[in-house]
Image (tube, rainbow, N blue to C red):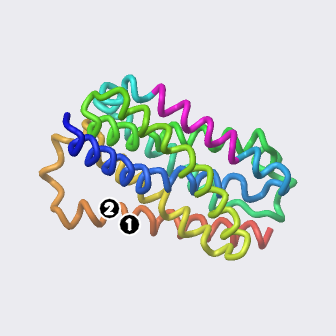
Amino acid sequence: MDAMETLLVFLEIVMINLLLSGDNAVVIAMAGRRLPPEQRRRAVWWGAAAAIVLRCVLTLGAIALLNVPYLQTAGAFLLFVIAYQLLADKKDKAEHSRAASTLAGAVWTIVVADFVMSLDNVLAVAAVANGDTILLIIGIVMSIPIIIWGSSFIMRMLDRMPGLLYLGGGLLGYTAAEMALGDPAWKSYAHLLTFEAEKLIPIMAVAILLVIALWMRKKSQTE
């Protein structure tokens, strides 16, 4: 690989991390938004550290993992549930969900979601790096500032504009639907879906997620 090729691969890895680390930053921001200010920074750092460690581990067997039937579907379901829990949560209901309002609870949510969501990032970077260990390491290390700064910025934005919570939840729901559609277990049924239907399913998943979350929040307010 000559210098120009290496530079192009490096730029590709930069773009992939910018695009795919955003959802990890959203998870950290949404999970840590209820913490006291002094604990938020710790949640960001612990959550980001978990994301990086997970990516290092997953890089070793990402392709093999993603070829396991139904694994992505299970991960998508788990991510959908996490998105729902983050959306349906309310600050003034903290006494009913103590784990979610503690540093340990927030970090656990981040770890589980990062495990699910790091798969796409690892696979994409591994494919672009084409087995180049140094470029793989660069790709993982580059995730650190993106996740840390991104989640801190999003957390501040959620404080100022709580309505953005639904945008973040919708992003997680969309990611979950795309992950399920990419499961190799469903490849034999791919011919049943038109191109338009395949693009419509993630949007429908987001709509269902938001409707259920809004309905449950309204119901909890009346109780």
Instruction: Using a 10 Å C-alpha cutoff, classify the residue at mark 2 as few (fewer than 14 neighbours), some (14 to 19) or many (20 or more).
Output: some
Q: Is residue 61 left or right of residue 212?
A: left
- Report the amino acid beneath label 1: Met
**As rendered, which of 86 and 30 lies closer to the eye?**
30
Is residue 54 within the magenta segment? yes
Residue topped by disc 1: 204
Horizontal and vertical percent position of residue 130: 24, 32
Please identify the quadrant where the N terminus is shown: top left
Toward the front, the furthest residue is 3
Span highlighted in magenta in the image: 44-57
Q: In screen coordinates, is 153 left or right of 101?
A: left
Image marks 1 and 2: residues in contact by CB distance under 8 Å: yes
Q: Which residue is more in the foreground, 138 or 28?
A: 138
Q: Residue at x 51, y 43 (%)?
A: 78
SS at mark 2 in the image: helix
Amino acid type, callout 2: Ile
Q: Which x, y percent locates residue 150?
A: 58, 57
Closest to the observer, 99 or 1: 1
Residue at x 80%, y 54% (from the top left corner): 35
Identify the element where label 1 is drawn. helix
Provide the major secondary structure of the magenta segment: helix
The residue that label 2 is drawn on is 201
